Image (cartoon, rainbow, N blue to C red):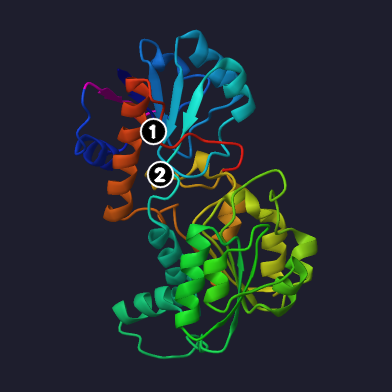
Amino acid sequence: MRVAVFSSKDYDRRFLSSVRTGDLELNFIEHRLTEQTAGLAQGHAAVCVFVEDEVSAGVLTRLAADGIRLVVLRSAGHDNVDLACARSLGIVVAHVPAYSPYAVAEHAVALILALNRHVCRAYNRVREYNFALTGLLGFDLHGRTVGVIGTGAIGTVFARIMTGFGCRVIAHDVRPNSECERLGVRYVELDQIFAESDIISLHCPLTPATHHLVDADALARMKRGVMLVNTSRGGLLNTAAVISALKNGLIGYLGIDVYEEENALFFEDRSERGAFDDDLFARLLTFPNVLVTGHQGFFTADALTRIGEVTIANLLGFERGDGPQFPVTTSD
């Protein structure tokens, strides 16, 4: 079975090719999947995509016309896929539901530690032989209240880590997790998360219900000086509202590994051109209390190994006629 692998980087080739692929023929395509590039999938039976690929109704219609019957995501999230359209066209969608919750959860903790202890500023100062401590004052994590929004696999690992720091952890999820409850995590309403948390970390999927979950109204209900961390999906934050809250001091620290317009920015070296055609992103980078990383939370050898294994298993299952190992369902 021929598979068009879109948005492929060197590490995709390495980790996918390291798995025994049977009769699969993987054709690696550097371009993102869009309506303009969908024609590159012609002659293939399946496409393999990542979070920045566009799997809209228009793209799916073109893929179906070219005989594509399977879309395999190299990610857990699938908010970039029009699932209703895929079903109507008879296209099966599969994903990697749990490649490494530790990778993303640990990255969220790294953002917290780097922001709190001003690691980036300290690193730059020492390289210039400036050992003054002015402006580097942090706070003890022990005893602070951490609010976790979304306690699936990643949110639960994050909660466990923060419990280990001695934090008081509260959480909100439409489906409470018994493992979190065993850790002593208390489930509360969103209003209580906003009102009581010194640190808020987002670990929920992007859906119509969670789009701009953190908007001006939500920010106004948070503790002044709150630390806000997002390693999930950029669309959970209203970026304009976040910038306003940074300007007036409502947000004391912001750590993000995702951005709502990241498809036009992330996963490429844009150092020659810069990102200044995106005024909101450029504004974010001007704040000394903001730390942005380029959607690297998933990027560990362990996670990429698992992504490669599950992606190939999904493809081989479909090729055998058994169906992919992890199809996307309405409950995912």
SS state under label 2: loop
Give percent across and percent down for residue 327. Answer: 48, 34
SS state under label 1: loop
Q: Is residue 295 above or below residue 25?
A: below
- Residue in the picture at 73% in, 66% down: 190
Determine the image quadrant of residue 15: top left
- Residue in the picture at 53% in, 39% down: 78
First of labels 2, 1 by sequence position: 1
Q: Is label 2 or label 1 in front?
A: 1
- Residue in the picture at 47% in, 45% down: 76
Q: Is residue 61 above or below residue 308?
A: above
Mark sitting on residue 35: none
Residue 290 appears in the picture as rendered: no
Viewer-proximal residue, 2 or 319? 319
Q: Magenta stretch: residue 26 in it?
A: yes
Give percent across and percent down for residue 189. Answer: 74, 68
Q: Magenta stretch: residue 190 in it?
A: no
Kindly identify which residue carries mark 1.
7
Q: Is residue 253 left or right of residue 2?
A: right
- Please give the range of residues in magenta: 23-31
The residue under label 2 is which amino acid type?
Phe
For mark 2, does the 10 Å Cα neighbourhood hold few (<14), some (14 to 19), or many (20 or more) residues? some
Distance of label 2 from label 1 (alpha carbons): 9 Å
Mark sitting on residue 267: 2
The residue under label 1 is which amino acid type?
Ser
For mark 1, does the 10 Å Cα neighbourhood hold few (<14), some (14 to 19), or many (20 or more) residues? some
- Residue in the picture at 55% in, 70% down: 180
Give percent across and percent down for residue 285. Answer: 53, 60
**Split into 4 quadrants, where in the image is the C terminus?**
top right
Q: Is residue 185 left or right of residue 119?
A: right
Does the residue at mark 2 contact the one at mark 1 (Cβ under 8 Å)?
Answer: yes
